[in-house]
Amino acid sequence: MMKIKYNISKHKRINILQFFLYCFVVFVISVLFLFVGIKNLSSKDKKLREAKEQQELYRTKLDNISKNTREYNKEIGTMSRRWRNKVRFSNSVIATKTYDIIGKLGVLEELLPAGVYIQGISLKVGAKSIIDITVVADSYPNLFHVYKNFSKYDPAIVSESESDGIFTSHIKVNLGLKKKNEKK
């Protein structure tokens, strides 16, 4: 038997230079793809690390906000209980009031003539019912009329001044007392 070999190429020999050139090009392309792949993986890994750090930062901030919220809610609860206790106490005082503040202010309003105004008032609730009042009058006769009206309540003139025709007087009055011959 006889073997027949067919070689249909023009050149029977392999061109080594061309073969190595093709191999080199394939090698360079492979190295380039490998380099690009490693770079992409490292940049994605870096982005992933940055995202995890950012997420951890947000988690820390959220934990701090939650902690502060719990503390604020606790403080608000404490203040709310205190306030409710104060309101409860005030309501009990109002319910069992023994001192009629509005009535005292009504008496003051009746005692002040036209042209006399209250500049300041301080109420001291107690057995003596002392009221510190500062009045402003547009004339001395009006101020004297205030003194005359307050005379039945044992007034004490603390200070008196005049500036540009306006008379100011600081008076302590005991509205709880009237003279013995008058009815309450």
Image (cartoon, helix red, strand yellow):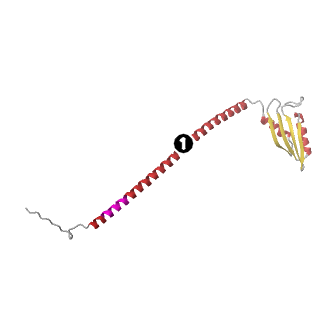
User: In the rendered image, which residue does mark 1 sit on?
Assistant: 63
In the rendered image, the quadrant that contains the N terminus is bottom left
Residue drawn at (53%, 44%), measured in percent from left and top?
A: 60
**Residue 130, image x and y in percent?**
83, 34
Q: Left or right: 178 with respect to 63?
A: right
Residue drawn at (66%, 34%), measured in percent from left and top?
A: 82
Q: Quadrant of residue 19?
A: bottom left
**Residue 182, image x and y in percent?**
88, 30
Residue drawn at (36%, 59%), measured in percent from left and top?
A: 31
Q: Quadrant of residue 171?
A: top right
Could you classify mark 1 by the number of other residues whose Cα lies within 10 Å: few (under 14), some (14-19), or many (20 or more)?
few
Instruction: Check disc 1 and report its element: helix, strand or loop.
Output: helix
Point out the stretch of residues depicted in magenta: 22-33
Secondary structure character of the magenta stretch overall = helix
Magenta-colored stretch includes residue 128: no
Image height of 91 relative to 44, above or below: above
In the rendered image, the quadrant that contains the C terminus is top right
